[in-house]
Image (cartoon, helix red, strand yellow):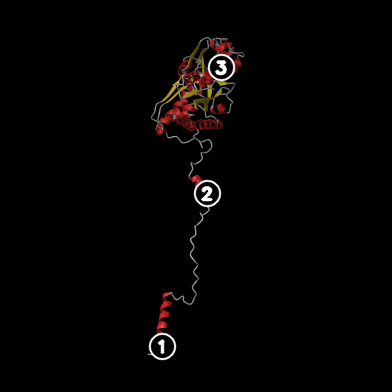
Amino acid sequence: MNRKFTIGLSVVILIATLLAACGGQATEAPAPIEPTVAVVEEPTAVPEATATEEMMATEEPAMEEGMLPDVDPATVQGDIITAGSSTVFPLSEAVSVLFEEEGYTGNLTIDSVGTGGGFERFCNAGETDIANASRPIKDEEKANCEAINRNPIEFRVGTDALAVVVNQDNDFLTDVTIAELGKIFSSEVTMWNEVRPEWPAENILRFSPGTDSGTYDYFLEAVMDVAYEGDGEGEKQILGAANIQFSEDDNVLVQGVAGSPYAIGYFGYAYLVENEDLIKSVSVEGVAPTAETAENGEYPLARPLFIYSDASVMQSKPQVASFISFYLSRVNEVILDAGYFPASQDALDQAKASWCDATGACQ
């Protein structure tokens, strides 16, 4: 073999080896190699909708209108002191039982001392956290609160029908007008037949909430002042009536009415419901007290129920704010069983808005 053939053969073998190493792509020209340049990538733009979703995911969810923050009673610490209306007492008690059943272990005091007595303890002495009331606060009571740097905040919690009641054995009184009711509780008459001739010639035995009671105040306004015009004349008539017993304890009034077929009294609807085996209601102006007639305004003696507190109290005592929030959120679960009727949704929403304003805890 000569030298030229050996060199040629070696070249052929070398080329074949290179082609095998390149995977048989030797027939295509390799792509030109661009110079490598370091590039700093710009952040990828997030679509607008996605950005909004991510932002919302990092924030607390917005509360629905009319909602308050959830309250876990088991985490609430500190004592709570309330006092006031005997009418609101059963409702506040029902809410407090629910609060305790769900884990609250502090001391929750509810004193039944009448609406006026409740405002005195809240606004004069400043010794309570919440005042229960069966009427709106009066201007002079507000002034007393302001004198001790309290600004009373009103929370509507329900509706009551003031029930006019008689003994179950009363067989003559089923309906009464406002004018007649005022006369029955006045010093103008002492016997039933002086109101209507067909009624018995028997003494009227009268039972009324005490003068510190919001129920008494409401009866003055809705009945006595309507029946007897003139400044203070309605109150003068009821205070001067014969055979009348006043008491801040509605149970005392129930027992009094239950004791005679010639007795008559008035108090919150809840006490009628609890004692229907002893007493019965009287229609007023032809309308009986029911949930429907109380809420739609047909029953003449329907009235709102309230609790009151103060922003500084709620902020310095978070347990008070928590209880009021729980009260407003859960009251309708117990209100019918307690013998009352729900407030309108608008009234309840306004109460919740007042809570949010006082605490700044709503979004």
Residue highlighted by disc 3: 220
How many badges with numbers are in the image?
3
Disc 3 secondary structure class: helix
Labels 3, 1: front one: 1
Q: Who comes first in sequence, dot 3 or dot 1? A: 1
* Left or right, residue 102 beside residue 39: left
Q: Around disc 1, counting alpha carbons within 10 Å, would you say few (fewer than 14), some (14 to 19), or many (20 or more)?
A: few
Residue drawn 49% across the image and 23% down it: 132
Q: Amino acid at mark 1?
A: Lys
Residue most toward the right? 229
- Can residue 106 be seen by looking at this rendering? yes
Q: Around disc 2, counting alpha carbons within 10 Å, would you say few (fewer than 14), some (14 to 19), or many (20 or more)?
A: few
Instruction: Provide residue 175's location: percent of width, then percent of height.
Output: 57, 19
C-alpha gap between disc 3 and disc 1: 136 Å
Labels 1, 2: front one: 1
Q: Amino acid at mark 3?
A: Leu
Instruction: Provide residue 36's location: percent of width, then percent of height.
Output: 48, 64
Residue highlighted by disc 1: 4
Residue 195: quarter of image: top right
C-alpha gap between disc 2 and disc 3: 62 Å
Q: Amino acid at mark 2?
A: Ala
Residue 287: quarter of image: top right
Residue most toward the bottom? 1
Label 2 close to label 3 by CB (< 8 Å): no
Label 1 close to label 2 by CB (< 8 Å): no
**Residue 58, above or below 152:** below
Residue 96: quarter of image: top left
Residue highlighted by disc 2: 51
Labels 2, 3: front one: 2
Q: Nearer the viewer, residue 217 or 259?
A: 217
- Can residue 102 be seen by looking at this rendering? no
Disc 2 secondary structure class: helix
